[in-house]
Image (cartoon, grey):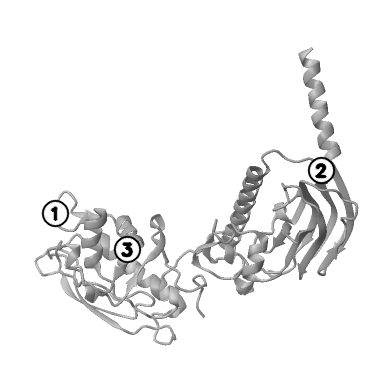
Amino acid sequence: MKTNFLTFCMAILCSINIFSQRVISINNTFTNDTVLDIFDGVPAFYAFRIQCSVTLPTDTSLVRIILKDTYGNELLVYEDYALIHNEYFSGVNNFGEETFYLPSTIGDSIIIQTNNASVYINRFVYYTTPFSGYLDLQKFHIDSLTNRKADEMNNKIKDRQMLWFAGYTPYNALSYELKKGLFGDKYNMEGWDFYTGGIYTQMSQIDNANKTTSNGTLVEYFDWRRKHNANSSTSPYFDGDPDYFYEWWGDNTGSHEGWIHELGNGWMTGTKNQLHFGGCNKGCYAFAPVAAIEAVANLYFNRHLNYDLSEQEAISCGHDYLNAGDCISLPFHGGSSGSILQYIKQYGISNESCFPWLDSMVYCTDKCDSPLYILKINSYLFSFTTLLMEKRLPLPLRSGA
């Protein structure tokens, strides 16, 4: 009896799913922007999905399909563009983005947008039965699609030897209507809204000769000092400031010491003398991240700003605020570069003259009250020693000429 009752209940559920699903057949190819009036006689629905396939012949190709309801709201049904184009997105069935789950909705029209692309639409499917907990279902669905897009972007970024990273951002969390308001109608951001770090380059701007790699690796060798031939006097990016510093590379007898001359640091700033035999001779944990931030500032603004930041602040204030380490005393006798980066993220770091190198563990209160400038970072990936500068411009870090 229980078995028969369960079978009966399952049959009812199957019937509900079958009869709540309705089909609008299209079976047509679209290569231009089009508006479809297909909702005459269509009742309110709780999901609106598509079966279609697209062709994207160029790196700027775009297909976007939008549902407009009777209140004028626009909801994204489907989109595909070169940076996310793969087997999953190029041909879909029972697919929806913002329309996969809906509150009660009455459709007005379908807006088809194309740019150097074509889309064959087999059909639309809508459901007239509500989904319990649709808001949670829709959030999970959108998050899943966002992750899929970011994963495919990172695959193409690696394959095309681009130097940025895609992931979850406040921009890709926005609805289609908000993105349209920010970026304009028929926008194609080419991944800018997924940018989380690195040097942003549009895939369509990459030289065709460098669009694929034979072994799938990003680069075999990379040195920012040599990027754009910045260490060569023939390059417009050349920084000819010489460095003279005293170097020790052996014992302390004086037989392995000498003056080192370096000319042309590229995008890196000048070498700092940590004083190997000084009173604060274990400060490398601060010198390294500070130098990296100075270099990233040059790269971010694509100019030789050569900010001179205070290693003394990093050591003294990092110690006082975050217990980042100690360049003199045991048990520290050194410290954490990650903690220094965290200090700079939270508080920023001032110019060298505000807190000059004193070769000692002085208190942070010895720092000047009015720095000439303060640099902050908004994030860091310590495992890769990658630093992301705080955004002071409305655009991400871009590659130079």
Q: Residue at x 25, y 56 (%)?
A: 321
Disc 3 packing (10 Å; few <14; some 14–19; many ≥20): some
Residue 169 picture location, percent across and down: 54, 59
Q: Is residue 164 visible?
A: yes
- Going from N to C along the chain, the mark reached first, 2 or 1, is 2
**CB under 8 Å between callouts 2 and 1?**
no
Q: Tag 2's secondary structure?
A: loop
C-alpha span from label 3 to label 1: 24 Å
Residue 68 picture location, percent across and down: 77, 60
Q: Nearer the viewer, residue 94 or 250?
A: 94
Q: Which residue is mark 2?
A: 128
**CB under 8 Å between callouts 3 and 1?**
no
Residue 16 picture location, percent across and down: 82, 34
Q: Which residue is mark 3?
A: 347
C-alpha span from label 2 to label 1: 72 Å
Residue 368 falls left or right of residue 177: left
Q: Tag 1's secondary structure?
A: loop
- Amino acid bearing label 1: Ser
Residue depth check, mark 3 versus mark 1: number of the one nearer the observer: 3
Q: Residue furthest top?
A: 1
- Amino acid bearing label 2: Thr
Q: Which mark is residue 329?
A: 1
